């Protein structure tokens, strides 16, 4: 398999462009707990499939309904995917997030047969942090895995406010320096687990995830008007759940209003008040947000993306994308800088 780097959630324009204070404040208020729980040292060729989500949750957090999973790539490069998603690539310094703890698969740059990760570690309960060393001795990839628990609506799988999986590549500047320092600290600490049986750091996952979410959510539609607040609003949240769950459907305001058992006029008023736009405009913005993420994947064609986000023709999609981002989808994928100066993805 030839490796082609894929872009993820890079902040366009000015490096370290920070989300609005309202977004930062909302994320700072997240109630999170968790820890780093596994370290993997893989060498080409390698590939694995995760433990079933329910089994992993019962091991890591028996009292929780689900966990948020993340993988920090400390060295090397790898791909990751979940059912129904495109394959994404991550490099050293990137953070992979599975906000709903979905079953997933991960592997290196070369083809390899999938094995169950459960076959690579001792069965739980674990007296110390599991360490996986697996592969055929080729180029190495080191991954640190963590989990978090939160009852915030942001991680509610019924709302699907976030993609089932996404990869964040911090831009140069303070954000990248913070993430790199967190990775280095976690790597050093986890390398000691099993030698003197110290506990793995618990604050690092919380701080790291909040920073990664800042970078990812900076591109959510109308985040400056209260995107996170809209997820908590009893009127807007059900409609957003419908849009996020099926962005390709030709939704009407009446259908979206019915999801929350409110009138179309009330839904329109609340969307304008909380998000600064009517529901159908939000649908379009969300489609463009999703389209940009998909374009940054090296394995999805423009025509397929058009259908995925609700456009019957590639031409109609291209016009809508150009209105939203300043360049046609094909030019964005090739890395052409839009007139606004935003930086397209690094897809190869």
Image (cartoon, rainbow, N blue to C red):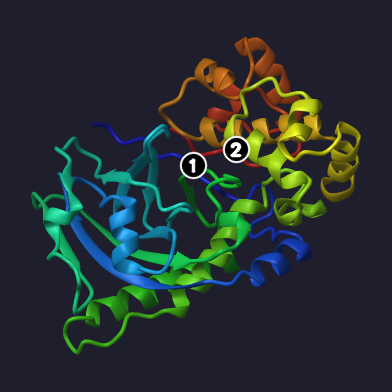
Residue 201 visible somewhere in the drawing: yes
Q: Nearer the viewer, residue 342 or 66?
A: 66
Q: CA distance from mark 1 to mark 2?
A: 9 Å
Asked if residue 339 shows in the view, the reply is no
Q: Is residue 186 above or below residue 64?
A: below
Q: N-terminal of the two: label 1 or label 2? A: 1
Count residues near mark 1 (Cα–Cα under 10 Å), then give few for <14, some for 14-19, many for 20+. many
Q: Which image quarter holds the C terminus?
A: top left
Q: Looking at the image, do the residues carrying marks 1 and 2 touch, with CB atoms under 8 Å apart?
A: yes
Residue 213 image offset from top left, x and y in percent: 58, 58
Q: Of the numbered discs in the image, which one, if any, rests on residue 344?
A: 2
Q: State the image quarter where residue 284 is shown.
A: top right
Return the x and y of residue 25 as percentages of the image width and height. 72, 69
Q: Which mark is residue 7?
A: 1
Pointer 2 local density, CA inside 10 Å: few below 14, some 14–19, many at least 20: many
Q: Nearer the viewer, residue 150 or 196?
A: 150
Q: Secondary structure at mark 1?
A: loop
Q: Quadrant of the N terminus?
A: top left
Q: In the image, is 318 to the left or to the right of 139?
A: right
Image position of 94 with respect to 81: above or below: below
| Front position in the image: 119 or 114 | 119
Residue at figure coordinates x 57%, y 47% from the top left: 162
Identify the residue at horizontal 62%, vertical 60% (top origin): 214
Choose between 265 and 167: the one closer to the eye.
265
């Amino acid at each position: 398999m030839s490796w082609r780097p894929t872009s993820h959630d890079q902040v366009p324009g000015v490096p370290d462009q920070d989300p609005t204070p309202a977004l930062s404040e909302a994320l700072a208020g997240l109630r999170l707990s968790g820890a780093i729980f596994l370290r993997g040292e893989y060498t080409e060729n390698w590939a694995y499939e995760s433990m079933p989500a329910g089994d992993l949750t019962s091991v890591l957090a028996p009292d929780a309904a689900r966990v948020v999973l993340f993988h920090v790539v400390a060295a090397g490069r790898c791909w990751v995917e979940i059912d129904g998603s495109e394959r994404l690539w991550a490099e050293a310094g990137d953070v992979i997030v599975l906000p709903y703890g979905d079953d997933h698969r991960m592997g290196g740059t070369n083809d390899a047969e999938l094995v169950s990760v459960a076959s690579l570690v001792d069965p739980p309960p674990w007296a110390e942090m599991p360490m996986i060393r697996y592969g055929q001795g080729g180029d190495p990839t080191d991954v640190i895995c963590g989990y978090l628990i939160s009852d915030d609506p942001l991680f509610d799988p019924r709302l699907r406010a976030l993609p089932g999986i996404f990869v964040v590549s911090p831009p140069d500047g303070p954000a990248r320096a913070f993430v790199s320092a967190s990775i280095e600290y976690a790597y050093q600490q986890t390398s000691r687990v099993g030698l003197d049986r110290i506990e793995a750091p618990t604050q690092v996952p919380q701080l790291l995830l909040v920073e990664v979410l800042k970078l990812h959510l900076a591109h959510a539609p109308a985040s400056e008007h209260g995107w996170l607040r809209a997820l908590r609003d009893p009127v807007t949240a059900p409609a957003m759940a419908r849009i996020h769950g099926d962005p390709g459907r030709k939704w009407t305001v009446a259908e979206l209003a019915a999801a929350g058992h409110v009138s179309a006029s009330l839904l329109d008023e609340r969307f304008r008040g909380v998000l600064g736009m009517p529901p159908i405009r939000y649908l379009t913005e969300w489609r463009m947000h999703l389209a940009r993420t998909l374009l940054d994947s090296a394995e999805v064609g423009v025509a397929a993306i058009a259908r995925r986000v609700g456009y019957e023709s590639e031409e109609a999609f291209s016009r809508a994308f150009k209105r939203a981002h300043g360049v046609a989808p094909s030019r964005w994928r090739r890395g052409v800088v839009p007139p606004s100066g935003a930086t397209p993805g690094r897809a190869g």
